[in-house]
Image: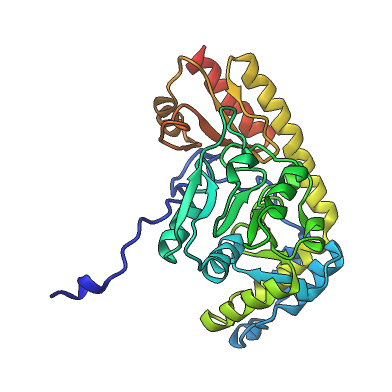
Amino acid sequence: MSWEDNIRRVTPYVPGEQPRVTGRLIKLNTNECPYPPSPEVSRILREMPPGDMRLYPDPEAVELKDALSEVYGVPRERIFVGVGSDDVLSMAFMTFFHGSLPVLFPDVTYSFYEVWAELHGVPCRKVPLDGGLNIDVSDYEGPCGGIVFPNPNAPTGIYMGLENVEVLVGSHPDCVVICDEAYIDFGGESALPLTEKYDNLLVVQTMSKSRAMAGMRVGWAFGNEKLIKYLNDVRNSFNSYTLNRAAILCGAAAVRDRDTLEKNTGMIIKTRERTSGALREMGFAMTDSLTNFLFCGREGVSAEPLFRALREEGIFVRYFPGERTGERLRVTVGTDGQMDVLLDFLRGYAG
């Protein structure tokens, strides 16, 4: 017998490539914001006394929760924070999905869901999107152990209206429904108000996209006070000190700075619409994105060779092999200048 016989083996999540190259590089593969975060973040990092790092952070992250409470109008007791929304979602899988029935999520979606299900021993079932890559709520009828979905979805970029979110939540009162809103600031309406009506809904958001703080790792969830208590019980049994001191302070400042949020998202939305129009003129088809990325492809132009050709030019986008995704690329919306370089390359490549 070997020590390896007792090892838990999982198929890990594969993140977007973080290239370490010199020279020209246009990075449009991981949906990062192309603009800086709030100026207050830089100020806090400059002024933070080095001696503060010798102390443990506040395990309750009160300053961050207070900022979220002020901006979103939600009592602190209904807010959970973690190291990016990935940490929040993993804790939610660990906390809420312990039944024998499968947890449901779309077949084309954030691939970490399946990884967490395997890691935490959660039975799951992938529900196919319809022919237009939309979530059909009628496919989620019947008993299940929980539901999780991004809204807008990734990598499709498609937003599902709140009336359908409410159908999912209201028709499954006996399990927790998680609405992952990583991209909600780029379009659509948050399901946050529904947490007042339904005690089984958890709404998860992040600073990685619209607030330009992917490197800081700050995420949170809104939900019923009882849901949040259960999450905190599991977190405190796992790691009480999840967010570091800098993340708490910078996160609070970024939440309060609505002007920078609106400025950055406004520029990204404007560039997204301009770029999607130019791509359509070149014959590319794409979903109607309400995110900071485009999911696009062109008939007669194979996605994988195009992905490799772009990479050779120093333009990094995301390619997802598979029957339903293999003929499209996911392209993060960068600056106008970055998108112009991409468009010029595509005009020469695709004609």
The residue at the point 79 percent across, 56 percent down is 194
Residue 124 in picture, x, y percent from top left: 47, 54
The residue at the point 75 percent across, 74 percent down is 225
Residue 233 in picture, x, y percent from top left: 61, 81
Residue 220 in picture, x, y percent from top left: 68, 65
Q: Residue furthest front?
A: 142
Name the foreground residue: 340 vs 233: 233
> Residue 241, can we see it?
no
Q: Residue furthest left?
A: 1
Quarter of the N terminus within the rendering: bottom left
The residue at the point 72 percent across, 68 percent down is 250
The residue at the point 59 percent across, 36 percent down is 156
How many numbered marks are there?
0
> Residue 197, can we see it?
yes
Is 230 displayed left or right of 250 in the figure? left
Establish if 307 lies above or below 349: below
Name the foreground residue: 265 vs 323: 323
